[in-house]
Image (cartoon, rainbow, N blue to C red):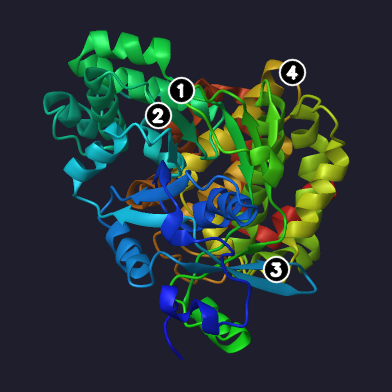
Amino acid sequence: MDRLSNQTLDRLGQPVPGYDRAALRPGILHFGVGNFFRAHQAAYLDRLMNMGLAQDFAIIGAGVMPGDARMRDTLAAQDYLYTLVEQSASRSDARVLGPIVDYIAPGDHGRVIAALADPAIRIVALTITEGGYFIDAATGHFDRAHPAIAADAANPDAPQTVFGLIVAGLRARRAAGHAPFTVMCCDNIPHNGNVTCEAVVETARLSDPELAGWIAATVAFPNAMVDRITPATSDRERRMVREDFGIQDEAPVFCEDFIQWVLEDNFPAGRPPLEKAGVEFVADVTPWELMKIRILNGGHAVIAYPAGLLDIHFVHEAMEDAQVRAFLEKIEADEIIPAVPPVPGTDLQAYFAKVAERCANPKIGDTVRRLCLDGSNRQPKFIVPTIAHRLERGLPVDGLALESALWCRYCAGTSDSGAVIEPNDPNWDRLVQVARAARTDPSAWLDMAEIYGETGRDPRLAEPFARWLAMLWQKGTRATLDAYLKG
C-alpha cells in the first residue's frame, strides 16, 4: 500500500480534495498544527475549497515547540495531506483533506517572520493549548515577567515564542506599509481573543511601546468558541485507517461527527466565507463560550478524575459507569448549568444532553488520561471560575469541591488500586508533592494561588474540600461518590 501523497490520491476509494491543490494560495498562517486544528478549522476550510471557495486562504503551518518537528516532517512526507475520520456511534466516514500547503519547521524563525510579513497572509491563527498563553492565574492576566517573554523582549528580532513572532511579523508589515493581519485564537480560553490581544500587545510593549500602541489600535483579535472532541492519534488509529479505509496515512485524525464554531465577525483584512461551511458569526461570543467552557470542558473534568482513580481507560467506559455518569449529571444540574447565563437560541439542558451523548460515543476512543491532562492549566479556566461564580452569589459548591478533591487525590500519583499514575501535567512533580502534603493539610492544595487565586481561601470551599479529600483517602472513590450522590 502506497503512502498517502498527491500521486496516490487517484487510487484511493475514499473522498479526496475536489479542488486543484496546486492552484491554492496561502492566506492563513497557523501556529499549532495539532489534531484539533486539523479536525476543526482546517476541516471547515476544506469544505469551502470543495465548494470552489476560499482558494486564496490555504494554510501555512508554523512550528514553535521542538515537538512540532515530528508533525511537520510527517505531513511534509505526504504532501501535507491527511485523513479525517468522523465517527458517530453507528458509523465512521473518512475523507482526505488538503487545505494545508506548507509547514515551517520549528526553529526557522526567519521564515516564519517573512511569512507573517507577506501581505497575502490575512489571518494568523493559534491552537497552542490553554497553557501556552503565559497567564498568571493569581491575576488572570499575561505574565510579562515570564522568562520566555523576557527573552523575546531582550531579542525582539530573534523571538522564540508565538507572541514574539507575531510582534516581529507585525513590525515588519508596519515598516513595509502593509495592513496588519487578524489574529484568530481557537483555544479553549475564556475571551480567547482578548487574552491573545493582551499577550501580543504586552510582549510588544516590553521592547517597543509605540508598536504596542499601534497593535492595540489597529489589529483585530476576534473571540471564538470552538468545539469538537478529537483524541490523540496512536498506532490504533493508523491501523484502522489502513485496514478499514485502505489509506497508508502516518498522521490521520479521528474525531466525533459533531462540530461547532461560533466566531465574532471582526476581520478587517478579509476572511473566507466560513458561514457557508457552517460557522456561526455573532457580535459577542461570550454566552456560547461560557456555555461550552463550563458545561463541556468543566464536565470533562468531572468525568476525568473519578474515572482516573478507578482505572477506567476510555471516556465512553466512564459514561457506562453508573456512579461516574450520575456524578456528572448531578453536578451539572445542581452547580454548573445554573452558573451559565442564557445563550441565544439554545436550551442549556438539551446542550448538556448532547454533551453526554458525545462523551458516551464508543467510536471515538477518547481516553480518560487525555481528559485528566494538564489540570494545572485547565482547572483555573474550566472549574475555578464556576466555583467563584457560585460563591459570589452565596451558593453551595459541594460538588465542585469534590471535583477539586478528586483532582488533588489523582495528583497524589496512584489510583485507588495502587496503580501508578504516570506524569500527566507540565507541573506534575510539584502537584504530586502538594497533593501528598494535602493528605494531612488540605489547605496546602487550595493555597496554590496560581490555580485557585483568592477562591482557594474561601472557607465555603475549604470545608467541603477537606471533608471530601479525607473521605477519598479513608474510604476510596466509590464510597465517596456514593456519599455525594446520596446527599
Residue at (47, 21) in percent of width and height: 220
Look at label 2 and name its amino acid: Ile
Instruction: Answer with mark 2 or mark 4, whichever residue precedes in sequence.
Output: 2
- Residue 85: x and y in percent read 62, 69
Along the line of sight, which residue is nearer the eye, 311 or 173? 173
Instruction: Answer with mark 4 or mark 3, whichever residue precedes in sequence.
Output: 3
Using a 10 Å C-alpha cutoff, classify the residue at mark 4 as few (fewer than 14 neighbours), some (14 to 19) or many (20 or more).
few
- Residue 36: x and y in percent read 53, 54
User: Which residue sits furthest bottom?
Assistant: 1
The image quadrant that residue 465 belongs to is top right
Q: Which residue is mark 1?
A: 140
The image quadrant that residue 67 belongs to is bottom left
Residue at (50, 30) in percent of width and height: 452
Q: Which residue is mark 2?
A: 135
Residue at (35, 63) in percent of width and height: 71
Observer-side mark, 4 or 1, equals 1
